[in-house]
Amino acid sequence: MGTHAPDMQRAAEWLAARLRLCGPLVAELWPTQGHPAVYAEWLGAPGAPTILVYGHYDVQPPEPLDRWKTLPFAPTVIGERVYGRGVSDDKGPLLIAVQVADAYFAATGGLPVNVKFLFEGEEELGSVHLPALVAAQAGRLAADFVLSADGGMWSAEIPSLTVSARGLAALEFTVRGPAKDLHSGRHGGSLQNPLHAIAELVASLHTPDGRVAVDGFYDGVTERGSAERQATARLPFSDAGYLAQTGAPEVFGEAGYSTLERQWDRPTLELNGLWGGYTAEGSKTVLPAEAHAKLTCRLVAGQEPGRIPGLIEAHLSRHLPPGVTLDVRPGEHGARAYRIPEGHVGRRVAGEVLEQVYGVAPLEVGMGGSIPVLETFQQLLGLDTVFFSFAVGDEDIHAPNEFFRLPRIAQGHQAWARYWARLAEVGRATALQHG
Amino acid sequence: MGTHAPDMQRAAEWLAARLRLCGPLVAELWPTQGHPAVYAEWLGAPGAPTILVYGHYDVQPPEPLDRWKTLPFAPTVIGERVYGRGVSDDKGPLLIAVQVADAYFAATGGLPVNVKFLFEGEEELGSVHLPALVAAQAGRLAADFVLSADGGMWSAEIPSLTVSARGLAALEFTVRGPAKDLHSGRHGGSLQNPLHAIAELVASLHTPDGRVAVDGFYDGVTERGSAERQATARLPFSDAGYLAQTGAPEVFGEAGYSTLERQWDRPTLELNGLWGGYTAEGSKTVLPAEAHAKLTCRLVAGQEPGRIPGLIEAHLSRHLPPGVTLDVRPGEHGARAYRIPEGHVGRRVAGEVLEQVYGVAPLEVGMGGSIPVLETFQQLLGLDTVFFSFAVGDEDIHAPNEFFRLPRIAQGHQAWARYWARLAEVGRATALQHG
């Protein structure tokens, strides 16, 4: 649980206290083997649908601290943005849902539908302890579907509805040579350098045309149909705009696919960290004992997260250069890819509401990232998940200077309020039953 | 000069004060554009040879601190060893020469030969400011040859005389992709990852059989003669013993050469540091903006240090993967390889003295490392250098838990005392003149 467990406990208690300020809402901390989840419910609308609102109060590490222009844990408003770690992912979007409940209670004394809130504290750790908690609390978590305050739209100008997410598998590995750091003058050239070896291994993981070179990695992956590919191609997206936004010199990825297809529909293997030897100012002539790498894969339908680390480990073992040993540690992260069914009532209501708020029908888009809980809710509760976050994908989540757009808060309030009201109408019409 | 300039100044002042404790020795701090050098001289033996004793009081950074068993800057005796940063490279060997001068003054009121001490403070920075200092002080530094307290023998049991050293060239480079760290879920697969790109670049620098793959790198390098190769092969060295000492699983290097040839007679290109992305505990799904590498080459006769960084930069540019940019910074380090002439009087005296102290003739060996001042002394003063250090190559220099063997101090005292006495006899016989 690392050194921030007391901070996480304080954050959970703050969130529970905030929920208890919402009229008659009952809020509880649900302990886990890791950080606690925060649960609250209001079930005063008999006969109306019941939704399970999901979000997370934990955040990514703020490092590198020297790249922040404001203090990461002192939210700072500059112009129409608030800056701080977690403001976009996912504390801001989560609070929108809480504030809408607060407003409904204040204005009408109740909510149009039954609402259960489940805010976890380990999403950025792969929601490792959530499945056990959801399984244990399956009775109390029963609902018609999940409405997720986590996710995000792809632009601030045009509303979008995320209908798919990639899955996740993670791995760390270490290459070891000599038992201790050696002088590269004396020993250089006569022993394998772990930095050379790890570079060879990392380079071996992709082909020059951007495909993952691990045997079996693409097993089970199917091509999307041409109609779907054309729909993606029609979205208002340009590589030029994308490069302007990211500052990268050119796009690069698996040959034969567009940038959006590479982000949404194709699996990836990405190094997240690579290090060894002397990395501080100046020069140190060392042949280091070890070199390290962290990587994550994004998965699509047909790929089994539990199988991927083994495939990569086999690849690394097979490509290990002479003179070093290999230690592979599968990460705790793991999630299948997800896609919400066409015609799902929650998806339909989301589309209607977004069109009302923004005056234009939302685009249906994919998500390159992963939300491991999607699988948990589907497997353990039988529930689909509708993404309904008002974060935007360019808000530097997981990076320095994360921000959230202030106008999106008011838009989010409107949308969540309308969503619950509209769902109550639809629910009465179609006699949705609790899951 | 970094943040340790005041510490370096204190170290220089301590050393000058220690020299002034030696009878009539005059000691001065010689400022440079970097850290000061410490100079002392005694010229009270007219007609006798004059030697220039070289050493350095600066040390390598102590990192990684968590690998030290004792405090790196609190020398600690455990058994027959003293542990601490710099005790073997080069503070211990340097102090031996000072203590011998002290003893001579106390016992006889003078030294057998004229002695000039030059102890610099930037050897670990490639002696970058020494050439300017030596050029400016060439008159005062005039001598017959240099006797170096830096260097080291290859084993504690059998005396050895180092007759060659490899040269040095250094380089750093950075690979840049997006303008800032991005979320690897959203962006992974659609932009080049700088960690992938730098791994490809590093992997491209060697062939699978251990040769440097940079065009022109071996230009001017000649094979040693078969008699010399046989002499090296006869040295009491085994790969098994070397692996036991280093803890490496197997030897690895350029095909067609023995381990000692790889260390002494063949040039190398070694990564000293490689880093980018998230390197702390846990997982962070980042596609980093940058990745970095530091490397040094060890050079042999025929290679020009100033030419090597350009060859490597050309190689890196030619092998740069798509989607990233490259920034190459040549290091300030640079030194030609060196070999002391056969029959040099200082080399001959060293052989005699070591045989007297150890009862066995010393082995003549090479040195994988580099001492940039060798070139400075040869070019600017016309002086050859005799290595006469009592450090041993296994004393974890440049690494955690550097140590120096206490019995070597007494052996060093005997050897330095005999050296000066014997040189005085030889000098009278052969009428050596000041350089």
Image (spheres, coloured by chain):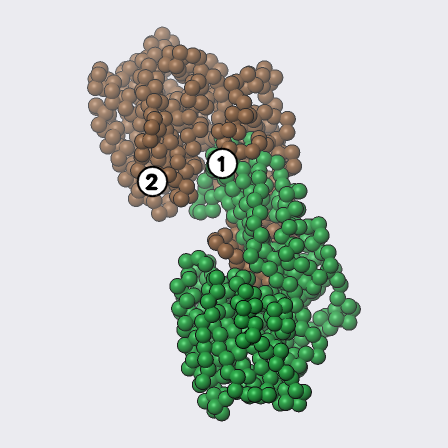
Chain colours: A green, B brown
Q: For the view shown, which residue lies furthest in the bottom direction?
A: A108
User: Which residue is label 2 attached to?
Assistant: B71
Residue closest to the eye, A12 or B335: A12
Give residue B23's quadrant in the image.
top left
Rendering quarter of residue B425: top left
**Tags 2 and 1 touching, CB below 8 Å:** no
Q: Name the residue located 47 percent from the left edge and 34 percent from the top edge.
A: A183
On the question of residue B148 being in view, the answer is: no
Percent x, y of residue B20 = 23, 29
Q: Residue furthest top?
A: B429
In the rendered picture of this protein, how many numbered marks are placed on residues?
2
Label 2: how many residues lie within 10 Å, few (<14), some (14-19) or many (20+)? Answer: some
Q: Which residue appears at 65% of the width and 79% of the height? A: A347
Q: Viewed as shown, does residue A370 lie left or right of A15?
A: right
Number of the label disc, if any, that sits on residue A248 = none
- Helix, strand or loop at mark 1: loop
Which amino acid does the dot numbered 1 rest on? Ala
Residue type for callout 2: Leu
The residue lying toward the viewer, choosing from B2 and A255, is A255
SS for dot 2: loop
A262 lies above or below A295: below
Q: Chain of mark 1?
A: A
At 47% across and 31% down in the image, what residue appears?
A: B370
The N terminus of chain B: image quadrant = top left
Query: Is residue A141 or residue A259 the one in the foreground?
Result: A141
Of A348 and B173, which appears nearest the observer?
A: A348
Split into 4 quadrants, where in the image is the C terminus of chain B? top left
Above or below, A423 relative to B308: below
Q: CA distance from mark 2 to mark 1?
A: 21 Å
Does residue B102 appear in the picture of this structure?
yes
Q: Which residue is mark 1?
A: A179
